[in-house]
Amino acid sequence: MQARRYLSRGEALAAVGAYADYLQAAPADLAAAREQVRALVMAGLTGEAADRYRTLYRHAVAAGRWDLALPILAEGRRARNDLGLHLEELATAAHQAEKAADRSLALHIYTEMVAKDDTHPLVARAWIRLLLLLHADPRRRREVGDWLQRARRALPPGPWRDYLEQSFSPAPAGRAGPAADPSGSLAGPGS
């Protein structure tokens, strides 16, 4: 494919055009569409790349292809593109990342959600999941205290705040850490 030859020579803009020509004839080729987005990033066209990453991600989700959607999302994040996903989309992606055992991606998504400083219940839930995932990672347990203080400041009084306090209260003798649901479910207040 001509586009790949351009890309291998570092001719990103030429590759973008060649991919566009190819994708006119084969619009369902998600691999080529991802390669085109990479060429857009290489060419410095980050706004257009973010739009394309978002479109590819949504197509993969609509097709039920989380095996494609999550890597597309992760790649977009690595390319420092804000894909402009809605809170509902982020929450679903984080849930799917956890199901796929991609805790790193789930943590990144939850961190993005809590940074929105929103009172939406999905953000409250993201705080809890973020803390539980951090606590479950022995390499990141020291971060839990800082994040816990942030969560306490961010969560208004109510069921999610109560759940936070119950789950992360000082451990009685013989118990250490949060009182996480042993099933690992994503349930919480109002779920």
Image (cartoon, grey):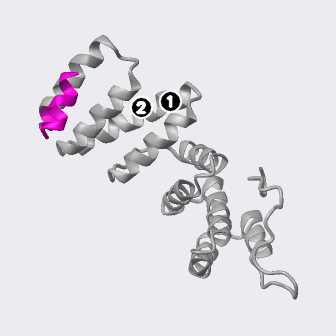
Q: Nearer the viewer, residue 60 or 50?
A: 60
- The quarter of the picture where residue 129 lies is bottom right
Q: Is residue 151 left or right of residue 116?
A: right
Q: Is residue 120 left or right of residue 85?
A: right
Label 1 sits on what residue type? Ala
Residue at image mark 1: 60
Q: Nearer the viewer, residue 115 or 111?
A: 111
The answer to if 61 sits in the magenta stretch is no
Q: Sort mark 2 into few (<14), some (14-19) or many (20+) by Cα contacts within 10 Å.
A: many
Q: Residue at x 46, y 35 (%)?
A: 57
Q: Nearer the viewer, residue 51 or 57?
A: 57
Label 2 sits on what residue type? Leu
Helix, strand or loop at label 2? It is helix
Q: Nearer the viewer, residue 122 or 18?
A: 18
Q: Residue at x 76, y 73 (%)?
A: 178
Q: Are marks 1 and 2 in contact (CB under 8 Å)?
A: yes
Q: Position of residue 137 (x, y in %)?
A: 63, 69
Q: Residue at x 30, y 33 (%)?
A: 35
147 above or below 126? below
Residue with the most extreme top position? 25
Helix, strand or loop at label 1? It is helix
Q: Which mark is residue 56?
A: 2
Q: Which residues are magenta?
A: 1-13
Q: Residue at x 20, y 44 (%)?
A: 42
Q: Is residue 53 left or right of residue 98?
A: left
Q: Split into 4 quadrants, where in the image is the N terminus?
A: top left
Cα separation between marks 1 and 2: 6 Å
